Image (spheres, rainbow, N blue to C red):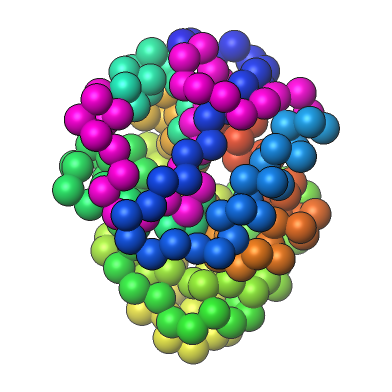
Amino acid sequence: MPHTGHLSDVLVYTRITGYRHDSIHAGTAALRELGEAHGFTDASLAGRSAVVFLSTSGEVLTPDGQAALRRWIADGGGFMGVHSAACTEYQWPYYGDLLGARFARHPAVQPGTVLVEDQSHPAMAHLPLRWDWNDEWYDFRNNPRRPGVRVLATIDESGYEGGGMGADHPVVWCKEFGAGRSFYTALGHAIDAYSAPAFRRHLLGGLRWAAGAAG
């Protein structure tokens, strides 16, 4: 489905075969409430504006599911990955390309400072350039920053213990992917994140961009 310029229905996918985040229920509720406030609902993939992988983990798609996601993107659909979406489908190279980076490790949950790099993006426009936030700060197997990838925010490794990527540690990014769009945020480990207005606006902005409803 080509981008329509607005949000219609959104598929929220939460299947796990690995670690289960206690925050999945809170995240699903938050997205449902955002939908009620902003005019979209969660539903099946056909005819929708975006699909969200919300803290999925492990190998979660059948071959038919993989084919459906590939067709979805090829037809101009939007994809948003949240937190452990980066711990998903390690055996499927296409998914790694769609997401942009795969999870490697993380230290203990702790406060950190997110450095907003692109305030023009709807997921970041409401945030200060230095945003203090408590989360599970993921290291990735590769740095997603490359031509064609729009890094929106990094984490300041000097402000927390256990970071392993160095001075350039992206945690939020997006990109055009073929005819579709992909947005990923590493944030969203804890239950209380999904009741925080700033994080909800972050998710909504990412979803609107992925669906083609914002530039």
Which image quadrant for residue 196? bottom right
Residue 164 shown left or right of residue 110 in the figure: left
Tell me the residue at 31%/18% (across/down): 71
Which image quadrant for residue 68? top left
* Vertical order, 78 against 108 (above or below): above
* Vertical order, 193 against 207 (above or below): below
Tell me the residue at 38%/52% (across/down): 16
Residue 55 shown left or right of residue 36 in the figure: left
Q: Name the residue nearer the viewer: 184 or 158.
A: 184
Give how far across and how far down residue 150 sits, in percent: 47, 43
* Vertical order, 165 against 36 (above or below): below
Q: Magenta part of the protein: which range?
A: 38-67
Is residue 121 visible to the viewer in this orientation of the structure?
Answer: no
Q: Name the residue nearer the viewer: 121 or 200.
A: 200
Which image quadrant for residue 116? bottom right
Give how far across and how far down residue 67 sits, in percent: 25, 24
Give how far across and how far down residue 211 sits, in percent: 56, 25
Instruction: Say whether residue 27 is magenta.
Output: no
Quarter in which the C terminus is drawn? top right
Instruction: Say whether residue 41 is magenta.
Output: yes
Tell me the residue at 26%/30% (across/down): 66
Give how far across and how far down residue 137 sits, in percent: 49, 72
Is residue 148 visible to the viewer in this orientation of the structure?
Answer: yes
**Residue at the bottom extreme, as displayed:** 161
- Say how many tags the image has: 0
